[in-house]
Image (cartoon, coloured by chain):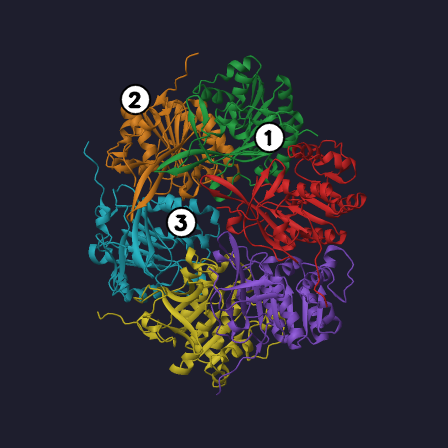
Chain colours: A red, B green, C orange, D purple, E cyan, F yellow
Amino acid sequence: MDRYVVERVKTGIPGFDDLLGGGFPRGTTVLVTGPTGTGKTTFAVQFVYKGAELYGEPGVIVTLEERAQDLRREMLSFGWDLRKYEEEGKIAIIDGVSSVVGLPSEEKFALEDGLNVEGFLRYVYRVVKNINAKRLVVDSIPSIAIRLREEKDIREVLLRLNTILLEMGVTSVLTTEAEDPKRGRISKYGVEEYVSRGVVLLDLVEKDVELKRYLLVRKMRETRHSMKKYPFEITEDGIVVYPSGEIY
Amino acid sequence: MDRYVVERVKTGIPGFDDLLGGGFPRGTTVLVTGPTGTGKTTFAVQFVYKGAELYGEPGVIVTLEERAQDLRREMLSFGWDLRKYEEEGKIAIIDGVSSVVGLPSEEKFALEDGLNVEGFLRYVYRVVKNINAKRLVVDSIPSIAIRLREEKDIREVLLRLNTILLEMGVTSVLTTEAEDPKRGRISKYGVEEYVSRGVVLLDLVEKDVELKRYLLVRKMRETRHSMKKYPFEITEDGIVVYPSGEIY
Amino acid sequence: MDRYVVERVKTGIPGFDDLLGGGFPRGTTVLVTGPTGTGKTTFAVQFVYKGAELYGEPGVIVTLEERAQDLRREMLSFGWDLRKYEEEGKIAIIDGVSSVVGLPSEEKFALEDGLNVEGFLRYVYRVVKNINAKRLVVDSIPSIAIRLREEKDIREVLLRLNTILLEMGVTSVLTTEAEDPKRGRISKYGVEEYVSRGVVLLDLVEKDVELKRYLLVRKMRETRHSMKKYPFEITEDGIVVYPSGEIY
Amino acid sequence: MDRYVVERVKTGIPGFDDLLGGGFPRGTTVLVTGPTGTGKTTFAVQFVYKGAELYGEPGVIVTLEERAQDLRREMLSFGWDLRKYEEEGKIAIIDGVSSVVGLPSEEKFALEDGLNVEGFLRYVYRVVKNINAKRLVVDSIPSIAIRLREEKDIREVLLRLNTILLEMGVTSVLTTEAEDPKRGRISKYGVEEYVSRGVVLLDLVEKDVELKRYLLVRKMRETRHSMKKYPFEITEDGIVVYPSGEIY
Amino acid sequence: MDRYVVERVKTGIPGFDDLLGGGFPRGTTVLVTGPTGTGKTTFAVQFVYKGAELYGEPGVIVTLEERAQDLRREMLSFGWDLRKYEEEGKIAIIDGVSSVVGLPSEEKFALEDGLNVEGFLRYVYRVVKNINAKRLVVDSIPSIAIRLREEKDIREVLLRLNTILLEMGVTSVLTTEAEDPKRGRISKYGVEEYVSRGVVLLDLVEKDVELKRYLLVRKMRETRHSMKKYPFEITEDGIVVYPSGEIY
Amino acid sequence: MDRYVVERVKTGIPGFDDLLGGGFPRGTTVLVTGPTGTGKTTFAVQFVYKGAELYGEPGVIVTLEERAQDLRREMLSFGWDLRKYEEEGKIAIIDGVSSVVGLPSEEKFALEDGLNVEGFLRYVYRVVKNINAKRLVVDSIPSIAIRLREEKDIREVLLRLNTILLEMGVTSVLTTEAEDPKRGRISKYGVEEYVSRGVVLLDLVEKDVELKRYLLVRKMRETRHSMKKYPFEITEDGIVVYPSGEIY
């Protein structure tokens, strides 16, 4: 039998695919985790935006921590015009905030309030099919958990989410939070990393009273990945990883 | 397409705007966090006071930990005469303490006791409109949380607060508490930083049995900010940041 | 406008007022915190005793951890004769222990058992007015909290206590407990420092198998205070701070 | 009496049997633990796959964190064709995921939803007998615990599981999770290691901003095992341990 | 007024009284705390035994962790014949264990099962009066707490106990437990030290793979005590403190 | 009066009795604690086996974590034939596992399911009397605690167990678990060490990426024991302690 070759999805993040043998495995679900201010949302949106811009792959963004309009405005500072691809049907943003905060949503895609996990998954599934998406972002897992209000089932919810995403065939990026990864805790609930097939950590290290950003691939199934900490920056064009740089 | 340019709000804190490319992004909500005695309240009031004094922008201060009259007196020690701008309609202070402690409030603006999150937001909204405020301070988040008495919903409350503030168009500073930021925990509830678009940490570092103050911008959306720790002082004119200083 | 000048209350603790620009701001409430055996009770009583002895200011001591008679006896070892000033109407001690432990109190001022926060505040208010007190000590906050038996409201209780004390115009010292201040936790409940306008930490540092006492002003509103750790001793005349000493 | 000689089961992991005097004791239950991304699932599957391929021993894999089809695909990247041995009746995979996530299973062996510990054990027992299995993998213990939803009985469940497995005579590998083994906590619930007869830790150590993998046998009954940390790699042929290598 | 002189109670522990200016203050209650195996029970019994033997002061021992007969036997290894002084009416041992474990007590003084705090205090009071005791030992506080089964009131129980003991006029030693005093937690419940007037810590420090015993007076009201760590040993004659020794 | 001489029970562990002045005090109860894989069960069984083999003292083993048959098989790897002494009536093993896991026990002595603490103690008492045992092992305390399902009473259960064992006159070894003894927590529940009269810690220390075993006597009533950490090994003849060895 010939050795099985895994299809790779280019991430659109300069320098990053080199660490993964070409990109994420097609169809996999990757957790992006780290403390606040490390660029998780930027990473996730870049994955979908560059998918549309550079590789012609439609993508869906589920935004649960800020409204679609706020996200669009912010991304303009990187020169990313999400609206343009939305109009072309290449990107869809699902507004998961307006209903929660009691404001009417002017978005095409918006989650109702009071949804359960099935309702959530069904809606996402429908939008993915609607634009024939190949990429998906959910920002963030803790916001789903809060919505469902039953933390002790978070593992089951994630298991279900992961499996459905695999079933859809999309390559997905989910974000979560890690207060202090250096002390071993690399996710909010301590379970996200175990039910995910890939884990990318964005973190900070202090050097001469300055915090330096670094990225570490902690886990990536079907991939012989590097286990080194690589420096990255948030430039005016988005995230750039330096595979030959040093963080110290 | 031309690159989108973010409008900046000058903070009125000498030296600080240089770290942010000119100031906070207009309309954003910034979390100011740190241990006790680091100057969070001073930072927040300075933002509103200097807005009125130097930039002609009206501002609202919601004070939940001390009465308006006590705040006014304290700020006099910096030479800041809040009363003067209140009389000119450029500053409004909402007294959130008197009703809780069972004292009658002699303030023009005061929160009733027993308010829920909607009532709180509605009242703030009304005062913001009343003086056409461009700046807002809420001091502090834990005091809101206590008032609402349901800690586990703090994330949702903050999400709602953030969104309403964005909707109002004001640039806001919210304060919270962090016992020991060096160990990764930079907020009281561990969620404030994730739902905020900007996070400024005021902290202390020990050098030769003396505690030195420093400031760190941990996160600022739409902004290529420095990640360095800068020394600052609480002078008799308020907070001054030293962008070229060293904390060690 | 002339710069506002804060009136200072001399503490009666040799060396200490120098760190504060002359003393506590008149009318403020100061938290004195630290591990066991650091001298918090001595500090608090010295503040009231010296107020009466040196500055002619009447003072009230609310003792919740030992009976008035035990406190009096202990203070005799510093040569402080509380009884004398009590008879002159310059000091009043409120016995908050006897009723709790089921013993009859022979004190002039004693708290009943089963009191709530309003009852507590009302009684203290009455005694303050009775002797026209300018200074007040409550030793300690955790004992109030235990009495009220609803820890989750401790923040509100403290907010109310602080405000009432400001309203009374007395300058107050409240004591609380901090197991291990070096690790960031500087109070029993983690909230006392945030609702107080001043925080003084009494702590220990080990040097050559000996524990050395030091004092640190962590916070003092309306005051440009030092942030250095100063050595202090408990001498046979009470606490003495050494503003030019070194703890290492 | 002659000294009793323990029969050894070769693990199929190059270099590893040397640390154990030839392999696991026949019939024992071994816990494989460690943080995310250390190769626990690969270790476990390799044990069963190589058992079938190299030693002619049938094996059962209970997969509770990903579907059988996802596991098969992943293992192809190591050149391991599970399907082939399944068709030969040498490997059986029990799908424990589909029913939980509400998808129909197309697998020959699949757990029903809502099973209790007896049901779980009975089903596993039946499949073991069906293919006359000598090896068994359960990936992972936390997923069993979640399914049974009564964490406080996890010790009893594990005791029962261990005993039944001993009774079946299979040599078993169970996986669990350890956030930060360096701080003493080497399992998810803190009890797995005590009821297991063998414990193998897969962990990471940082050296020059790179995480290095190492393996440590923490416990192995009936075995005079090494207590050293050995480097290992996840190569394109699976896990390889280097008994003469150095991790630093 | 002449300086008040505190009467001292000699502890009977060689070398120790030197650290305290002659002994414990008469009538005070001292907490003896530390990890297991540091000699707390020996310290406490030595205080009572030597009181009877050397200073003619009768004493009561309340033993809540082992039966009177077991305590007696153990103390014989120091050459202390408790029985002899019991027969002379100089020492009384209250057996607090037999009733709890369901065995009949053959002791003259024994606590009934199911006692509440009042019953406990009343019984102790009665025995103290019976032999006209000047010294009292309670070994240990956690055992009282367990008996009363309401941990959240432990502070109040201790406050009551302390006050009653002061009222009785006896000088008392209470033992409690501290897992790891180096990290700031010096008692089981974190409150014992605050309601006690004296705190003596018995602890261990590692030097060259050997644990060395040391003693530290953390607090002693009415006493200018040393804050140094002194070595001590448990010799065949009981505890001996070395005021001029070094622990490192 | 002549100095009381404590009778010593030889442990049968080479090198160990030297640290204790000849052995455990006759009739005492000793806690053996430590992390997983340190040899606690081996230590405990060796104590009973060697008692029968070398000193002619009958012994009882209560096995609560593995079945009697599994224990017997394991111990054969040290050349210890428990069965032989069982047949001679010198050793009795009480199977505490079979009933819990729902398997019929073929053992002569087996605990019923659903037993309470009285039932447990009564059964053990009966077997001890049956073979006139002088030594007893209970492996382990956490398994008793789980069986009784009321963790908050664990202290009382242990107190009762200890007292009954003293009453029986047997010398006992009880095992418990300690995740990370270096950080001060040397038992599972934090209470076992306080109600035991002796505590032996088996732990690991890392030296050059290898874990080294060491033993420390933390407490032993009636015994002037060493407080040094001694290396030990699990050889093919069982545990051997090296009183003159170094662990570093």
Q: Dot 2: what SS?
A: loop
Judging depth in this view, the residue of F162 and B146 nearest the camera is: B146
How many marks on residues? 3
Instruction: Locate residue F31 relative to residue A190 in the image: left or right.
Output: left
Give the residue at mark 1: B29
Question: Residue sitting at 42 percent across and 66 percent down?
Answer: F212
Q: Dot 1: what SS?
A: strand
Question: Residue sitting at 30 percent across and 54 percent down?
Answer: E214
Instruction: Locate residue E35 relative to residue D126 in the image: left or right.
Output: left
Give the residue at mark 2: C56
Q: Dot 3: what SS?
A: helix
Kind of residue at disc 1:
Thr
| Chain at tag 2 | C
Give the residue at mark 3: E183
Q: Which mark is residue E19?
A: none
Where residue B153 sits: x, y (%)?
62, 39
At label 2, counting other C-alpha atoms closer than 10 Å, the crowd grade (few under 14, some 14-19, many 20 or more) is few
Q: Is residue E36 above or below residue A185?
A: below
How many angstroms separate mark 2 from mark 1 (CA)?
A: 50 Å
Instruction: Locate residue C242 relative to residue F152 in the image: left or right.
Output: left
Extreme residue in the right direction: A130
